[in-house]
Amino acid sequence: MAGTILIVDDVATNRIVLKVKLGAACYQPLMAADGAGCLRLAREARPDLILLDVALPDIPGVEVLQRLRSDPLTRDIPVVMVAGTADPALRRAALLAGADDYFVKPVDDALLMARLRNLRRTHEALAELGQRGDTLQALGLAEDQAGFARPGTIALVCDRPEEALRWRRDMAPHLSDQLLTLHREEALAQTSGPDCPDIFVIDGDLGGRGGGLRLMSELRSRSATRHAGIVLLHPDARADDLAMAYDMGANEAMETGHPAAELALRLRALLRRKHAADRLRATVQDGLRLAVIDPLTGLYNRRYALPRLATIADRAQMLGTCFAVMVIDLDRFKAVNDCFGHAGGDSVLAEVAHRLAENLRASDLVARIGGEEFLVALPDTGLPEAQQIAERLCRMVQEAPIALPDGRSLSVTVSIGLAVAAGSKVATQDVAHMVDRADRALLDAKAQGRNQVMLDASAA
Amino acid sequence: MAGTILIVDDVATNRIVLKVKLGAACYQPLMAADGAGCLRLAREARPDLILLDVALPDIPGVEVLQRLRSDPLTRDIPVVMVAGTADPALRRAALLAGADDYFVKPVDDALLMARLRNLRRTHEALAELGQRGDTLQALGLAEDQAGFARPGTIALVCDRPEEALRWRRDMAPHLSDQLLTLHREEALAQTSGPDCPDIFVIDGDLGGRGGGLRLMSELRSRSATRHAGIVLLHPDARADDLAMAYDMGANEAMETGHPAAELALRLRALLRRKHAADRLRATVQDGLRLAVIDPLTGLYNRRYALPRLATIADRAQMLGTCFAVMVIDLDRFKAVNDCFGHAGGDSVLAEVAHRLAENLRASDLVARIGGEEFLVALPDTGLPEAQQIAERLCRMVQEAPIALPDGRSLSVTVSIGLAVAAGSKVATQDVAHMVDRADRALLDAKAQGRNQVMLDASAA
């Protein structure tokens, strides 16, 4: 499906000309002749982008934009304003209201098309994240603090120190962000740690014609700066330079001469979008973590544990090492729940989980695989060592009483079934079989009086 | 942190020259003089990319590459082969062994640097997905069927039909994929549905010089083709055309004259990588879904339900409509567990969940928020209707006995507490308060003898 673009202009010929151009680029054009029509179509058709004339017969273009931005149904649609004259005040008002860009007629076709592609690409990437984020938004993990952008770090990258300082001096009054002036090499070296800039403002002709584009490509190829905002400033901006910058992924490309106040507005908007995207990415990470964590104990859940155990087994087979599996069950846990209530039972589970995790290595796997049942897997571990570890876990649970929320305390014990496999034998037995063996040993431990470790006989 | 690049060449001056060039681009160069050194350093230092000479004194370069590709520690590192001569057989062998590209000396510096940036950018994007995927890989959701690429759809995009047909005729013997020949407009129209091509092979001069790059940008700006593989074929490839194509995000850029067999190899490799990335993205989606689903019943979990309820309330407030909340509890569930065991209890929970979900609209929210407790929210629903729905749910649970896994069957009932809020009042009460009201009504229902609906008094 081609993207739909809503053209809003009161002059019919303007609409027709744009319609033809957009049609040639395989966009599906929609048209409105005034602000009311724009607002209605934007809500109904949800276009992928809006080209909005600033001078409309019914409502001023900037006000139309403000209304689009305050309606949840339309607020995320990219809007490019088109104006008959280069009135700086109007331009600032449009940017302040949330315009994604502002073109003055006559518009260079190739540049406009490149900018549309560029905005749609950025928008699609966010939408893809947001789609995943949908669930997460509902999870309340992604609070979108729209409108407010916390201060960020903006790097000004330029060959000539005096020019960079001038940029900084011009922009400082308009921004509360940290402004760094950097050379090209410093910009590339600056690509990690908490000081990594959120935005790079780059001289287009850095180290020679087209050098800014190359630096942008370098920055985009490094993990720390892949998602940085990038603004290219061209001293003598030709339309095809700017178009190229957009097609190569610049967030903004403009002439050096722009008023600092306007550049600052664009930087603030870019920073806000960048922070929102960062948050969305972090939210996706959090969401994935939630899928594999048991909320009560903070341990991995069963869903994670079994496949993870399979990779431990694979590794042991590949490297020819041993590994051990324990199934651990709380003794007489039903009685705990009956006497101390669910809250008491939950405290016991959480504390036992904590003691298990504390007494194992980071490379070991600990998971809660049932109500009161835990699974432990020890990579690179043979029989004598595994048995020692299991005995220690038993002791650690029994040793100190567990404090309950109601002020009382309680001593509990666990029974442990242990199975060990030598690397060479792992191939012939699947992981479920290992867990079965440990399970049988656990039943023995229970039968022998609980609070003890039993080894699966077939491993001896 | 700058990327590290391992240079493998037995001629010291070659290494030094490359080292200087890479240093200037702010890469951190590592060096090895032979295959053994390469394999050792690749494992130890895990460079971000390897430049590997095909002619090494100890092990042939292609064999070194094969060993890198068969070692889990090194198999994902991008490798660019560098050769003294353009031997087509050697070139094919290198691509077959998994080379990411193959340069013949003398190497054009700007082109090489652009290709390195390009490969690292692709690699970083995958690594970012893979990082999230780590957990998921362990979840067993992302089986990576390396080596095998299922057939895909490859579009050949060219202005001249006879040229496109010639491409197809040349490539068909080497590929089992579906090959389409398309014009530019068809390529842009072809961007949705199951037939959407996996790879676009594009004439660089499509519709005039640079037209291929523009089409690539268009394709990258549309959701269906954002992640397509893109190969640009240039009739008279100049190094800076190819470099530009790489910087703009082409997966491959080369001269039209390349042997079809080699192009086919590159297309197969690209298809394999594309399918793997698609799988990884799908896995991230699945993982996120798992974070919000209760595995036993398939309903949403508590973590999802409460924030979701808040958005239902927000919407009601915005639109001035009503909404209703029910808390539903299985009656005497403990007795079910005691008499029929956990397996019996689980069957009952799953079946009750199923009956609830079946009897509600898709826009309603049903979630399991506790052991035997469910939450239902009905958007746009006022009191009389909500009460009818609640009564119906009660009946649906009671009506038919539930079959248990052991062959027995069992009748159960639920109690339901109901609270309704009018749009105008929603603003003054938070969502937790609504759930509390429904909870209190539920207690009334239990006290009045169970198997019934009670309405929260304050809503009357």
Image: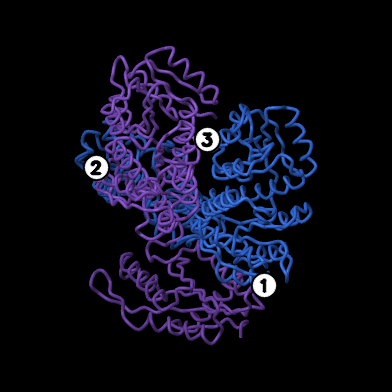
Chain colours: A blue, B purple
Rendered position, B443 above or below A128: below
Q: Position of residue A245 (x, y in %)?
A: 58, 42
**Residue A83 appears in view:** yes
Residue, disc 3: A222
> Looking at this view, is A125 or B388 the one in front?
A125
Amino acid type at image mark 1: Ala
Rendered position, B195 above or below B55: below
Q: Answer with the quarter of the image where residue B352 lies.
A: bottom left
Of pointers 1 and 3, the one earlier in the residue sequence = 1
Amino acid type at image mark 2: His
Q: How far apart in space, not on screen, are marks 2 and 3 (Cα)?
A: 35 Å
Callout 2 and callout 1 share a chain? no
The residue at 43%/82% (across/down) is B451
Give the quadrant of the N terminus of chain B.
top right
Q: Position of residue A60 (x, y in %)?
A: 74, 66
Q: Position of residue A74 (x, y in %)?
A: 61, 65
Find numbered disc 1 in the image and state the secondary structure of the residue it sits on.
Answer: helix
